[in-house]
Image: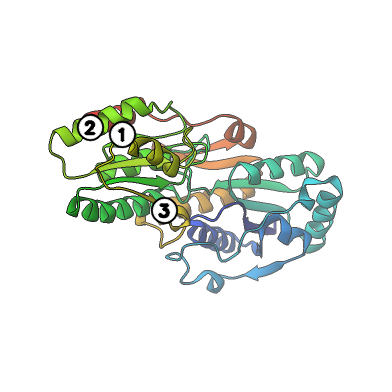
Amino acid sequence: MKKIGVFTSGGDAPGMNACIRAVVRTGIHHGLEVVGIVKGYQGILDKNFIPMTARSVSNIIQQGGTILKSARCADFRTKKGRKQAYENLKAEGIEGIVAIGGDGTFTGAEVFMKEYPDINFVGCPGTIDNDLYGTDFTIGYDTAINTAMDAIDKIKDTANADARLFFIEVMGRDVGFIALRSGIAAGAEAVLIPESKTDIKELVKTIQAHYDRKKSSVIVIVAEGDEMGGAVKVAKKVSKKFTDLPTRVTILGHVQRGGSPTAAERVNASWMGLEAVKALINGQRGVMIGVVNNQVVHTPFERAIKYHRYLSPTLLEMVKILA
């Protein structure tokens, strides 16, 4: 192998730049040419290839977002589009690709490799949701929960000042990893997640119990994918039972995607990028690089996509007991 490509795809996540940096510098260390592919699969179709040097990735490890950008690509979902992508990669001399992204990214890579087996893909899990099987933490997750925690801490200050009930919505359309960990870290009184059924009556009892104990404020964390439909709808239902209590809703939104990655994030993403290049050099294909119990794990794309990580029952118990 003489030349590899690297791209980011799907939702951006803090730490992607650290992973890009590691891929580029590890590739150069092993005598490979490295090409950055701008805007993911769309960049392959557009021949948006840029030669990468060690200098190209200087001073990016601390930056959020991704210097290689990200984009959706409907054409890559067609056989015609994938054929064009293959021809562009062959013309560029790219023999392997490190794909940094989530399940959609890996699904595309898996389909492509079945049709064109002479180009290998290795993946690095880039998503703030932490929902990919085969790694303890995905790239972006640690920063996202720290960003959410910091915001919740600030809201708690103002909630305490005026005895308010706050509902704070965090990202998590299908999973509640961000909600649960940020909620525990910030000392929230309740956390609502897609994985467990929301009982409004029980939530009202929980809130009332906290006020009966003379708490000056109550914070409820709601994952956006909660079955009730998010923080606004939950707050509307609950506020009917607390007409004399000021109730506020804050939706953190895309602030959770941005910001400088944490130290843990930078190390984790760098480790994955390094191992992804080593995997390509060793002839591996169709695997996602993960870190489980501080050990590198290679998980086939099919398993990483098909299986789901489950929330720890202990974490759910912590919310109820420690609140």
Q: Residue 70 at x, y = what percent? A: 62, 59
Would residue 284 be visible to someone looking at this image? no
Q: Splitting the image into 4 quarters, where does residue 115 fall?
A: top right
Q: Is residue 52 above or below residue 41?
A: below
Label for residue 147?
none
Please, what is the three-letter code of the amino acid marked with disc 2?
Gln
- Residue at the farthest right position: 80
Mark 2 — residue? 208
Residue appearing at x 66%, y 58% in the figure:
71
Q: Amino acid at mark 3?
A: Leu
Q: Which residue is rendered at x = 30% and y = 30% of the image?
A: 204
Q: Of circles 3 and 1, which is in front?
A: 1
- Sequence-wise, which precedes: disc 3 or disc 2? 2
Specify the amino acid type for callout 1: Lys
* Residue underneath mark 1: 241
Q: Residue at x 55, y 38 (%)?
A: 298
Q: Which residue is nearer to you in this view: 15 or 234?
A: 234
Q: Position of residue 253 (x, y in %)?
A: 46, 53
Confirm or deny contact between disc 2 and disc 1 (CB under 8 A): yes
Q: Nearer the viewer, mark 3 or mark 2?
A: 2
Instruction: Calculate the distance from the C-alpha at mark 2 to the C-alpha at mark 1.
Output: 9 Å
Label 2 Cα neighbours within 10 Å, binned few <14 / some 14-19 / many ≥20: some
Residue denoted by label 3:
252
Please rate how many residues cluster around mark 3, counting C-alpha atoms within 10 Å: few if below 14, some from 14 to 19, many from 20.
some
Q: Earlier in the sequence, mark 3 or mark 1?
A: 1
In the displayed structure, 84 sits above or below 114; it is below
On screen, residue 251 above or below 21? above
Chosen colour scheme = rainbow
